[in-house]
Amino acid sequence: MSENLISVNNVSVNFDYQENFLSKKQKIHAVNNINIKIKKGSFFGLVGESGSGKTTLGRAILGANKISSGNVIFHDDNRDFDLTNINKQEFKEYRKKAQLIFQDPYAALSPRMTVRDIIAEPLEVMKITNSREETDDRVRDIAAKCRLNLEHLRRFPHAFSGGQRQRISIARALVSNPKFIVADESVAALDVSIQADILNLLKQLQNELNLTYLFISHDLSVVAHVCDIVAVMYLGHIVEMAPSRQLFRNPKHSYTKALLSSIPSIDPENQSQAIELKGEIPSALNPPSGCVFRTRCPNPTHDCKEGNIAMGLIEVEPDHWVDQCCVNCN
Amino acid sequence: MSHLLEVKNLDVKFDTDEGRITAVENISLSVDEGEVLGIVGESGSGKSVTAKAIMQLNPGNTKYNENAEIILDNENVLRFTSKQDLKKIRGGKVSMIFQEPMASFAPAIKIGNQMVEQLLIHKNIDKSEAKSISINMLNRVGIADAEKRFNQYAFELSGGMRQRAMIAMALSTMPKLLLADEPTTALDVTIQAQVINLIKDIIKEYQMGVIFITHDLGVIAQVANQVAVMYLGSIVEKGPVNKILKNPKHPYTKGLLEALPDVNNLDAPLRPIPGNIPSPLDRPTGCVFRTRCPNPTHDCKEGNIEMGLIEVEPGHWVDQCCINCG
Ligand SMILES: Nc1ncnc2c1ncn2[C@@H]1O[C@H](COP(=O)(O)OP(=O)(O)OP(=O)(O)O)[C@@H](O)[C@H]1O
Ligand SMILES: Nc1ncnc2c1ncn2[C@@H]1O[C@H](COP(=O)(O)OP(=O)(O)OP(=O)(O)O)[C@@H](O)[C@H]1O
Ligand code: SF4
Ligand code: SF4
Ligand SMILES: [Mg+2]
Ligand SMILES: [Mg+2]
């Protein structure tokens, strides 16, 4: 249980940016020197500011984004895949083991393909099955696990509701029998009831199929419920990481505190107690020196305001990591 | 006092290859000045279609019923056909914040130019005045460097910034009615809190009426005065936000509230409403919720009950079939 499935070591991802063809090339620091270990069988949550690099990190782990420095290692049962040092053949192998559930079930499914063909496509593209019968068997098997009816397989996706479409995308992601799934805002577009249904399904499949998830979400109450461990990102950095209960009970970093205080209460008489963050999110083209949060921190100490503090996570309690600059302030 | 907006007996149907889809059936609602009506409900329940009907933005295959009325400022907008009239509901008296911000900015035109152009169409002002109103509005939605952003394209802004720019554009014409379709779903909670406060301030300041569509019941609790709960094209319950969230009557509303993950009780299992939403091509007769209702009585199960809201306490309306059952 405590074995790692994925090690992300000092990973940075930069994008080139040029305002127009005359101006000079700049770098967008989308993901900065990230270190995480994802344990086998865990539900690892990634939350944080929009534009903080969550999707970019998820895609880097899947090998869908170039890694600018550092490396990602996938520890399979009897071998390791090093994503920064992998040949084409190995990468094909890897893609069977690591899959993405798309954010938007409406946009992700091709309207001209039947549900059967949508789910079968990865098997055919990756040449996993050898005959039509075998493909059909696998499709039927995973469809049933995702609670789709067999009669649904002949229909086109537009005949389905949001929740059903999301189950189709999950079936498609799972049909190649992966071990690792990146779910990027997979329940964001769904109403609370369908959301609860999909989350229960993901949990159940985790047990049945021995899956490990990287779960990216804006919705902190959802993350608190399903994730074992949560990392909080701000402007390309992980600023805090802890087991979910620990993080929600005892947040340490000023950004995490602001984030948790902003969850809207369901009680109309309990009006917002949100710690308001002033000012604009700094640009990833030109991140602040020192603590990345210092331009918006409600209580910066003198030192961190000057930007002469180095970032880096330290372990303040077992498994609870906080950016070092923020441990002694506040 | 007459309402700012009153929708009466509205049906919205779409003609498709597979037949006629009933997206909205016989809904009635109203919004007063300075009031926020929240609309919640299952995905596909007809929330966006309802908002678009108010601006006549549904596509050509849309069929409205003859006796439907959408009265805005004493005029039935469903009868509007002339350009002049349509202008009133598309950016004049009514503005909309769309579910997808990228869709409402033209990719090749700078944000500022789009804002200015829109103001020139709807207000009797000159260019420099329009520019100063736009920049002022960008500032108000919390966009730093508004002068610089004014000269940028939508794709150059982060998701959250783009969303706020769209809110600024929708508010800049000072509409009487604002239609906000999932305006905060793409935002993280800190920015969401900022946007909610902004919308509340502006409503107070200008006495705007707002329809606020969202999946998020927490957001509803924070912004709405009134709430309408939709299921499969029908409003099954509506009333003051307090009553709906604290004393829900309809089994669907109760189910939504029970499905909500509670941050204060992480051990509680997540409880979805069992079953699937029927296809809009094949709406159940009688009570629309009967195929998934946890406790249908004999009568409503058979589908021979008529739907229709009745008032169970002042201002709190529930589908009639559901008052004695459930
Ligand atoms: N292909 C790309 N080219 C250039 N910049 C990019 C690209 N993809 C992402 N970025 C930039 O990298 C940063 C991180 O973006 P990313 O999409 O990972 O954020 P996110 O945390 O997933 O945000 P959200 O919550 O809004 O989805 C942003 O500044 C974004 O503009
Ligand atoms: N132009 C159209 N042609 C055919 N059907 C349509 C059209 N527009 C909407 N519909 C259907 O009408 C119903 C209501 O759609 P609507 O977009 O209003 O849902 P919604 O409540 O806004 O859902 P969501 O929460 O997912 O945004 C859906 O079943 C949808 O598929
Ligand atoms: S290091 Fe300073 S500026 Fe950064 S979050 Fe902590 S207190 Fe705020
Ligand atoms: S009328 Fe009957 S089926 Fe419909 S919600 Fe009420 S109890 Fe359930
Ligand atoms: Mg993202
Ligand atoms: Mg909608």
Image (tube, rainbow, N blue to C red):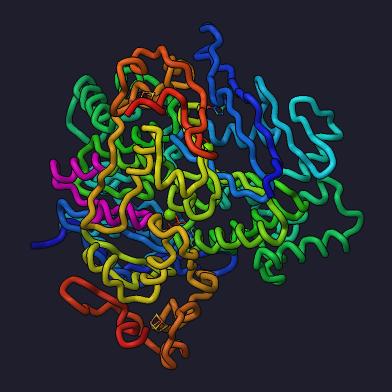
- Whether the magenta-drawn stretch holds residue B210 is answered as yes
What residue is at 50 percent from the left and 80 percent from the top? B291
Quarter-of-image position of residue B120? top left
- Whether the magenta-drawn stretch holds residue A146 is answered as no
What residue is at 44 percent from the left and 77 percent from the top? B289
Q: Which residues are magenta?
A: B197-224
Magenta segment's dominant SS is helix
Q: Is residue A263 visible?
A: yes
Residue B8 at x, y = what percent?
26, 68
Residue A209 at x, y = what percent?
72, 58
Q: Nearer the viewer, residue B276 or B20?
A: B276
Residue that protrudes farthest toward the left in the picture: B1
Q: Nearer the viewer, residue A158 or A136?
A: A136
Q: How many marks?
A: 0
Q: Which quadrant is home to the C terminus of chain B?
A: bottom left
Q: Nearer the viewer, residue B105 or B218?
A: B218
What residue is at 82 percent from the left and 64 percent from the top? A137
